Image: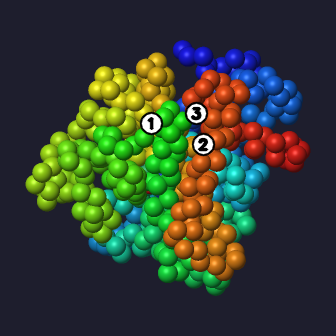
Amino acid sequence: MTQHKTRHHYIRDVLKIVKQRNHSEPVFIQAVNEVLETLGNVVEEHPEIEEQNLLERLCEPERQLIFRVAWKDDSGHVRVNRGFRTEFSSVLGPYKGGLRFHPNVNMGVIKFLGFEQIFKNSLTGLSIGGAKGGADFDPEGKSEDEVMRFCQAFMNELFRHIGPKKDVPAGDMGVGAREIGYLFGQYKKLTNQYEMGVLTGKGVGWGGSLARKEATGYGVVYYANEMLKARGESLKGKRCIVSGAGNVALYTIQKLQQLGANVVACSDITGTVVQKNGIDWEKLRMVSEDERKHVNYFAEITPDSEFCLGGKVWEVPCDYAFPCATQNELDDTDAADLVANGCKMVCEGANMPCTSEALDVFREADVLIGPAKAANAGGVAVSALEMQQNAGLERWSFEEVDDQLQTIMKSIFETCVHCANKYSTKEDYIAGANIGGFLRVAQAMLSFGIV
Ligand SMILES: NC(=O)C1=CN([C@@H]2O[C@H](COP(=O)(O)OP(=O)(O)OC[C@H]3O[C@@H](n4cnc5c(N)ncnc54)[C@H](O)[C@@H]3O)[C@@H](O)[C@H]2O)C=CC1
Ligand SMILES: O=C(O)CCC(=O)C(=O)O
């Protein structure tokens, strides 16, 4: 138990209700618990939160969709998947959040991601509500045609629920510019409208923002850099490890290298690759983005690398660690390995990558933690900038978007510092992010009345 645990009976009561109501959704309960346990002092300072029952209202999605997605594979078999969209909160703007295509997607996973998205989107200071969606479709090993047919079938239902002022999906795991292209093509066909602002993460030639692809990873590093600066430290010459080799991991690695860090290892579903003198980023990008292959193949074509089949990247000694793959990928044993090997900072690129027990190990060892809601908010922030460009029929330069991203990440960090100092302890950026995100949402909910 840490000092962050629940202080207020109201929070305990809400948690109990959330657990009862969502008993089959452990990751959603984990996400709610991690937020509510940091809100004790805020709830004490603002009795109206309890009077208006804001917390229970916030933990119940405004709307949830589950739908059948039927499509034909290349051998002519009819396949059926389950599609989801959780429209969690629209108090700050249209529902906004990515779509995930992964076999382990279920309602609990989508709800945890949608719940986190409310606070993350609030922290950006932009006008976006919280949502998430996806399907239990596994893109691994599917042909280009199968991916296209699946995306079209998915949009055949989703199109009636989304719109630039209603709900604006984007990518997440398994969904990148290729899938957004197929989804947008089908939306356009079904509605007979060229509504650019209905999806973000589009190709740059047809309404996508420059720097959206890079934004999440770059933002993670900008946030980490702010945390280090506040401690009088820097990334220069530091050994870093990154989990994942997809969109977020790739651009985290690139920015780390640009700022002088030595990224010695990364990983994916096949295992971990170590390259002591620094990961060959251009080769990794080609393998992951262009060829859609894995780090086992990267290792095969990289003579000075070592590959560990199924191995965890957390065993590789480092100064700073960047989990950028998936939820609960780093547990207390991994955390203990990192601490024993001298790791001093963990900055989360993935959503909820550390288990609660792992976070306790880091707190105990005074390891700096950059919480996902703050550190990976750069992606959705640039999605909102894409919406702005689409609405104004504008196209901003890469530098312009990147400058705005840096300003937003700095401001998110300042919010975390302010709220940590006021309501928790110095450098408790987890509490800082939760509270900073929550306060803006709470204020809007109070203004709107009970709706
Ligand atoms: N794409 C975006 O803009 C944003 C993504 N995120 C989060 O970042 C994380 C990664 O997302 P993307 O890079 O977009 O997905 P992606 O699909 O491009 O890449 C995911 C990578 O993680 C690897 N992976 C999956 N499970 C793993 C495991 N158990 N152990 C090791 N590696 C594993 C995959 O092989 C792949 O290399 C997710 O948690 C996502 O929700 C957060 C903010 C924005
Ligand atoms: O760009 C977006 O709308 C959402 C990005 C996302 O899925 C996330 O922040 O987890």
Instruction: Determine the CA span between mark 1 and mark 2.
Output: 16 Å
Say which residue label 3 marks: 429
* Mark 2 lies within 8 Å of ligand 1 (Cβ measured): no
In-front residue for pair 421/445: 421
Question: Do residues under tags 3 and 2 come within 8 Å of each other at their CB atoms?
Answer: yes
From this viewpoint, is residue 66 visible?
no
User: Is 70 rendered above or below residue 236?
Assistant: below
In-front residue for pair 236/27: 236
Say which residue label 1 marks: 233
Q: Quadrant of the N terminus?
A: top right
Name which residue lies at 86% across and 31% down. 48
Image location of residue 167, percent across then percent down: 67, 62
**Label for residue 413?**
2
Name which residue lies at 66% across and 28% down. 421
Amino acid on which the number 1 mark rests in the picture: Glu
In-front residue for pair 210/70: 210
Q: Earlier in the sequence, mark 3 or mark 1?
A: 1
Label 3 SS: helix
Q: Earlier in the sequence, mark 3 or mark 2?
A: 2
